[in-house]
Image (spheres, helix red, strand yellow):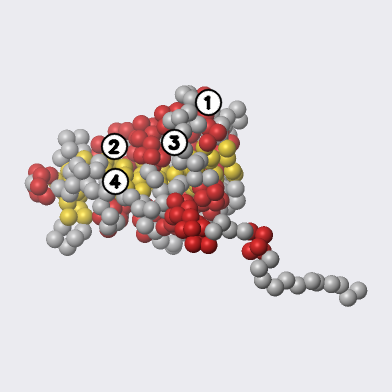
Amino acid sequence: MSDTAVNVTSKKDWASDQEVRWCPGCGDYGILLAVQQLMPELGVAPENTVFISGIGCSSRFPYYMNTYGVHSIHGRAPAIATGVAIARPDLDVWVVTGDGDGLSIGGNHLIHALRRNVDLTILLFNNRIYGLTKGQYSPTSEIGKVTKSTPAGSIDPPFNPLSVALGAEASFVARTHDLDRKHMMETFRAAHDHRGAAFVEIFQNCNVFNDGQFTDIVRRQNRDEMLIELVHGEPIRFGADRQRGVSVGADGQLRIVDVAEVGEEAILVHDAERNDPSLAFALARLSNDDHSPTPFGIFRRVQRQEYASAIAAQLAQASERKGPGDLAALLRSNGTWNVTSTN
C-alpha cells in the first residue's frame, strides 16, 4: 500500500456516477455506504485504489466506486487481485465477493490468496443464497434449506466462512453485519490497515430470496443478548448487563455461561493476536445456528510475511547472485522448432 501523502477527499469523491442497481432494501446498500464513508478517513487516493469482484449481486460493487475496478469472472477475483497486488504493491487492492462466488467456484482461489498472505482486503457478503440467479442454495445455506435447486431441502453441510479462512491460515479474520454501519467501518478500517490478507465476513440480508436469515441475531432489539463482541485483551462478555460470557470447559470446549455462576475469573480473555489459530477457530464455531449468540469483531490478527514483499526479496536475492535478468535471453535459451506446412 502506498505511503505517499494524498489530498483530502470526501464521500462524494469515492462514489461513481453510476446508478446503484440492487433490489430495494438489499443489505448491499448499507455495505456500499459504509465503504464510501470510510475511504476518506483512510488517507488513500481513489486513483491508487482498486476494487475487484467476481460474479454475483455483490460483484456490482466496483461500478459504484470512483476508483479503478474489475468486474471479473465467477470466483476468480482473488486470483486477479493477487496479480494486481504483486505487480503493483503500491496500490490498495480490495476484493468484493459473495458466499456463492467466493466459496463455490472460487473456493480454491480464495484459500490460496489467504494462505499466501497476499496484501488484499477481502469482503465476503454472506446472505446464504444465490441471489443473482434467483434463489438457489449456496455453500453457506443451512441443511434443510428449501430453494429452487433444493425443493426437498439441502443435504449439504454448509461452509463456515470464518473456519475456511482460519483453516487457510489467514492472518486477519473478522465478522460484521450490514445493519451496523459504525461496526462495519471499524472492521473494514482494521482490515485495510492490516499488512497481508484480511478476510471479513459480512452478514448481509437478501430481502428477496432469503429475507430475515440473520434477524434473530442482528435486529437492534436482539443485539445485546445475541451479539458477542470480540475485543482484543478484554473478557468475552455480553448481554444487556454483561451478565453472560464465554469460558473454556475442562474438555477444552468453549461454552456460553452466566458470569455470576462461574465467576469473572473463568471468563475467557480474547486474544486476537495469538499465533495459534485454534482459539479463533473455536470462537468461529461457537454459534450453533442463526438463533443463538454469535461472535462478531476481529477473530485473528497476526503478523507474517506478506506475499509481494517475499517475492520482491526473492527477486532481489536472485539478482545479486546472477545479475539482472534478461527476458529475451530466457525466451531463446532452449531449443526452438520451425513448423512448416507440407501443403
The relative height of residue 58 versus residue 7 in the rendered view (above or below) is below
Mark 3 touches mark 2? (CB < 8 Å): no
> Can you identify the residue that label 4 sits on?
295
Left or right, residue 253 beside residue 262: right
Mark 2 packing: few (<14 Cα in 10 Å), some, or many (20+)?
Answer: some
Dots 1, 2 in contact, CB < 8 A = no
Which kind of residue does numbered mark 1 sit on?
A: Asp
Of labels 4 and 2, the one closer to you: 4
Q: Residue at x 52, y 24 (%)?
A: 12
Q: Which residue is mark 1?
A: 13
Name the residue carrying label 2: 223
Pick whichever of labels 3 and 2 is earlier in the sequence.
Answer: 3
Q: Nearer the viewer, mark 1 or mark 4?
A: 1
Decide: marks 1, 4 in contact (CB < 8 A)?
no
- The tag earlier along the polypeptide, 1 or 4, is 1
The residue carrying pointer 4 sits among few (fewer than 14), some (14 to 19) or many (20 or more) residues within 10 Å by Cα, namely: many
Can the viewer see residue 224 in this picture? Answer: yes
Q: Give the distance between the C-alpha atoms of the residues marked 3 and 2, in whole angstroms.
A: 38 Å
Badge 3 amino acid:
Asp
Residue at (49% x, 45% y) in the render:
89
Q: Earlier in the sequence, mark 4 or mark 3?
A: 3
Q: Amino acid at mark 2?
A: Arg
